[in-house]
Image (cartoon, rainbow, N blue to C red):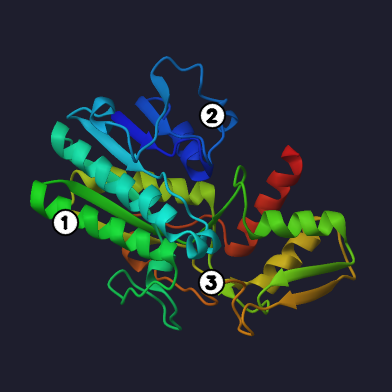
Amino acid sequence: MNVVLTGGAGFIGSHLAERLKSHQLRILDDFSIGAKNNLNNITRNNNISIKKCNLVTADLSQHINRDSTIFHLAARSDVRESMVQPKKYFKSNVIAMTNLLEAMRKKDAKYIVFTSSSVVYGQSSNVNAEKSPKTPISIYGLTKLMCESAIETYCNAYGFKGVILRLANIIGPRAPKGILHDIILKFKKNAKQITVLGDGKQTKSYLHVDDCINAILLCQQSLRHQRQPCQVYNVANYDQITVKDVVKFIASEMNITNFEIRYSKYDNSSSGWHGDIPISKMSITKIKKIGWKPRHSCENAVRLTVNQIMNTK
């Protein structure tokens, strides 16, 4: 398979790159977020090329062939940053997306897999299925939804086949930020007291990156045989846990006991920051029908990730 992977030096992208290393693989990344050392395990493979590339300004058609399958993972994904720098997110996420789609159209490449996010659903107490209303409350969420719409339109207008994956909170080694890293660092500084953002009751699904990669690859394999031009799948865990649960599991793995949790609420709400979604639940019924299911529960994913992070320091 001829593969183009954007954002391949990032957290999820580098794990996907390792699973695609037997293919003819071209990785495009500007290294503004991703790190070159994330790709150390595959740099010696002759069938893999790594190109520093600005997806907004580059002529991407020079990197794409007619038989290329595109995995588009490159994106800015910091919800808080998106709320104070909207233009940066429209440029990095939406303009890059349209530039990539135009390059595909120019080279007659037909297959694209895109990682979107659960944040496109916005605030809802319901369990969101793929056809649930989408009302994002952050600029990041809006840019992801705009990218989804662009892909669906190109699929319908130009005969592309696309898969859109709405990811839950993905955790694992190489993540440069996130709740697990924050809490681990805070515990290292003070094992007796920790301050968490929000009220601790925020409830979300946490999925280990290995399970996420399995979902991405399974959906890619079904891409050429799907009847509809574009399919959307939720990728999440069976269960959800609270931030307070996350703190408890991390403390347990770090052998920390008898500590105090303090809470820092945004705007006197349960949110941790502007644009945060306190409760996020997604149905995975649809993706289970094509054969995917998570191997790690939320708790196991957190505990596994903590150990992986601690063992790589």
Q: Which mark is residue 276?
A: 3
Q: Residues within 10 Å of mark 1 (few under 14, many from 20)?
A: some
Q: Secondary structure at mark 3?
A: loop
How far across and down, in percent of the image, does residue 189 sit?
A: 86, 56
Q: Which mark is residue 39?
A: 2
Residue 50 in sight from this viewpoint: yes
Question: Distance between the Cα atoms at labels 1 and 3?
Answer: 29 Å
Distance between the Cα atoms at labels 1 and 2? Answer: 33 Å
The quarter holding residue 191 reads bottom right
Residue named by callout 1: 153
Indicate the secondary structure of the residue bearing disc 1: helix
The quadrant in which residue 250 appears is bottom right
* Residue occupying image coordinates x 9% and y 52%: 157
Q: Quadrant of residue 178?
A: bottom right
Query: Do tag 2 and tag 3 residues touch (Cβ < 8 Å)?
Result: no
Image height of 307 relative to 239, above or below: above
Q: Earlier in the sequence, mark 2 or mark 3?
A: 2
Upstream in sequence: badge 1 or badge 2: 2
Give me the residue at 49% from left, 73% from top: 280
Instruction: Give the distance between the C-alpha atoms of the residues marked 2 and 3, in whole angstroms.
Output: 31 Å
Residue 83 locus on image (x, y percent): 49, 65
